[in-house]
Image (cartoon, helix red, strand yellow):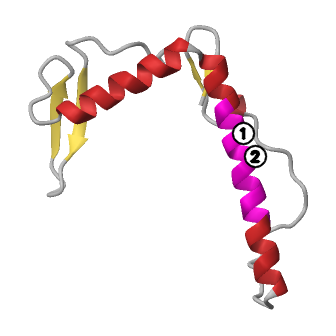
């Protein structure tokens, strides 16, 4: 895979419209997709500002999600709802973002 970098005006992106048609636009001339182009550039800016902080935020979010999944499973179990076979109540460590499709952004891994 290639390394992600800040999109330039000539960088092309594709977008799927509500009719299922794929359109190509560039960041320099987004043609009706200005909000998406601005949002993508803002995301890249944020990731490049402090990738380690973003990784810490991601790790915290994963941990909170796991806690809520367990809490929901426990509530369902207490209400007598049978749990699906793939639902576990066993402790499992929070996944390391570097192991779940992380992207190298100049030396730091950010998923």
Residue 80 location in percent, x, y? Answer: 80, 91
Distance between mark 2 and mark 1 Cα atoms: 5 Å
Give the magenta part as a residue range: 57-70
Q: Secondary structure at mark 2?
A: helix
In screen coordinates, is 65 left or right of 79? left
In screen coordinates, is 4 left or right of 59? left
Say whether residue 84 is visible.
Answer: yes
Residue 98 location in percent, x, y? Answer: 70, 28
Asked if residue 59 lies in the magenta stretch, the reply is yes
Residue 82 numbered mark, or none: none
Name the one closer to the observer, 55 or 103: 55
Q: Classify mark 1: residues with Cα within 10 Å, few (<14), some (14-19) or many (20+).
A: few
Quarter placement of the C terminus: top right
Task: Please tell me which residue is depicted at 43% across the width and 21% down the height of the picture.
Answer: 44
In screen coordinates, is 54 left or right of 66? left
Q: 103 above or below 73? A: above
Residue position marked by numbered label 2 in the rendering: 63
Residue 14 location in percent, x, y? Answer: 24, 35
Residue 60 numbered mark, or none: 1
- Dividing the picture into quarters, in which one does residue 89 lie? bottom right
């Amino acid at each position: 895979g290639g390394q992600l970098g800040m999109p330039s005006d000539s960088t092309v992106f594709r977008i799927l419209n509500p009719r299922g048609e794929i359109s190509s636009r560039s960041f320099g001339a987004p043609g009706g997709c200005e909000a998406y182009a601005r949002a993508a550039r803002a995301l890249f800016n944020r990731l490049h500002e402090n990738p380690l902080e973003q990784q810490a935020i991601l790790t915290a979010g994963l941990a909170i999600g796991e806690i809520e999944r367990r809490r929901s499973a426990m509530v369902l179990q207490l209400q007598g709802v049978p749990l699906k076979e793939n639902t576990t109540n066993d402790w499992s460590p929070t996944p390391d973002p570097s192991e779940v499709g992380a992207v190298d952004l100049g030396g730091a891994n950010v998923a």
